[in-house]
């Protein structure tokens, strides 16, 4: 009989875990140890291989997606409004190299010709089409019928239309004249919808097409001192949201891309220190033209209906406006006071 805490002097403690195994199964110890060693060696070898293989597959997947994104517009007729802007130029470069039949629109004919020469210089003429140029000014609504006819006459049809123009103003609502209000509405609302209505019959008859509206985040939320601008962006956002449902039966896709700010290619203005700048500042919360162009390509390739390009805080503001409106309004009011204090 043994007393707890004492050990029989005749019993010796095994020197290692292997001796314990030998006591349990003397015949199978060598086999078990060998199997365990083999399994461990196999694991050590296979895990890095699996990691490398997985990384390679992800890289290949990304490369294939990139290739598909660049070739999804090959031979398609694609219109870019305000092709002279930073985003317009970037989209023109990407789609031109992708083999699209580009129709570039802008207000200045000389600058459009310069852009055409630049695209030709940076591309292979055997793989690309010379762009066609159309003068287009959304501020002059009365001239849009003629511009629509010219766009349709370029190739006789239209596959993709990227709405990329915008007129901005920042001022207290009571200081803006009705003339300024009308000018913003013409550029940001009446102009784009007039062009959309002009090309829709052609798309409906062919039962295909894609309209992409590049719109401000102001189409989703409203920031103080941009009342008319936000109103125009809300209006055009609502139009394209309604249009999406109306033309889906004809095989026409409608996409909206909302961004905080597209940074200019040159040095930006010094950012404001007001509270509102957290929601709507040029840098660092803006996106570069190449980043925005990449989103346009993805939207076209995957036919995404709605895209929001914004950092976390502006995205939170969009959701707060829907679910916690009183909190959102309080933050905006505090931003106005903060802005006034910094003036």
Image (spheres, rainbow, N blue to C red):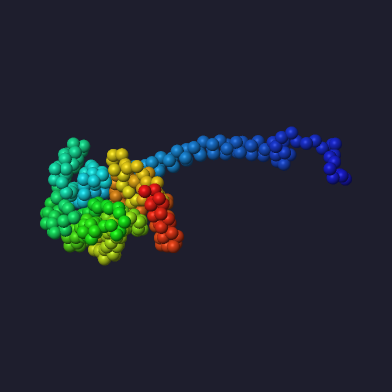
The residue at 47%/38% (across/down) is: 49
Residue furthest top as drawn:
15
Residue 337 visible in the snapshot: yes
The residue at 21%/45% (across/down) is: 84
**Image location (x, y in percent) of residue 68:** 29, 46
Q: Nearer the viewer, residue 211 or 110?
A: 110
The residue at 36%/58% (across/down) is: 221
**Image location (x, y in percent) of residue 319:** 41, 58
Q: Is residue 111 above or below residue 224?
A: above
**Image location (x, y in percent) of residue 87:** 26, 46
Q: Nearer the viewer, residue 120 or 159?
A: 120
* Residue 34: quadrant of the picture: top right
Q: Is residue 308 above or below residue 60?
A: below
Q: Nearer the viewer, residue 90 or 174?
A: 174
* Residue 316: quadrant of the picture: bottom left
Q: Is residue 198 left or right of residue 86?
A: left
* Residue 147: quadrant of the picture: bottom left
Q: Is residue 342 left or right of residue 11?
A: left
Q: Nearer the viewer, residue 135 or 41?
A: 135
**Image location (x, y in percent) of residue 177:** 24, 59
The residue at 29%/48% (across/down) is: 297
Q: Which quadrant holds the N terminus?
A: top right
Residue 237 visible in the snapshot: no
Q: Is residue 24 left or right of residue 32?
A: right
């Amino acid at each position: 009989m043994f007393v707890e805490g004492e050990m029989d002097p005749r019993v010796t403690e095994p020197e290692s875990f292997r001796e314990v195994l030998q006591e349990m199964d003397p015949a199978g110890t060598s086999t078990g140890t060998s199997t365990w060693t083999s399994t461990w060696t196999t694991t050590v070898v296979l895990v890095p291989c699996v990691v490398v293989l997985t990384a390679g597959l992800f890289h290949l997947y990304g490369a294939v997606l990139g290739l598909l994104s660049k070739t999804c517009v090959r031979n398609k007729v694609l219109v870019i409004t305000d092709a002279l802007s930073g985003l317009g130029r970037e989209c023109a470069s990407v789609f031109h190299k992708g083999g699209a039949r580009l129709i570039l629109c802008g207000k200045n004919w000389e600058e459009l010709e310069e852009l055409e020469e630049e695209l030709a210089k940076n591309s292979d003429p055997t793989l690309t089409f010379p762009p066609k140029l159309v003068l287009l000014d959304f501020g002059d609504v009365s001239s849009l019928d003629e511009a629509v006819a010219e766009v349709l006459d370029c190739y006789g049809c239209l596959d993709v239309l990227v709405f990329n123009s915008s007129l901005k103003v920042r001022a207290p609502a009571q200081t803006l004249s009705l003339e300024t209000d009308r000018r913003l509405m013409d550029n940001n609302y009446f102009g784009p919808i007039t062009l959309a209505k002009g090309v829709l019959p052609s798309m409906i008859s062919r039962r295909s097409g894609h309209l992409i509206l590049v719109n401000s985040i102001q189409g989703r939320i409203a920031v103080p001192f941009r009342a008319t601008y936000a109103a125009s962006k809300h209006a055009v956002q609502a139009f394209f949201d309604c249009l999406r449902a109306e033309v889906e039966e004809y095989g026409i896709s409608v996409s909206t891309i909302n961004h905080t700010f597209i940074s200019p290619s040159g040095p930006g203005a010094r950012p404001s220190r007001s509270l509102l700048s957290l929601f709507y500042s040029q840098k660092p919360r803006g996106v570069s033209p190449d980043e925005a162009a990449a989103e346009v390509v993805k939207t076209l390739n995957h036919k995404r209906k709605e895209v929001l390009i914004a950092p976390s805080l502006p995205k939170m503001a969009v959701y707060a406006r829907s679910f916690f409106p009183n909190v959102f309004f309080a933050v905006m009011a505090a931003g106005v006071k903060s802005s006034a204090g910094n003036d």
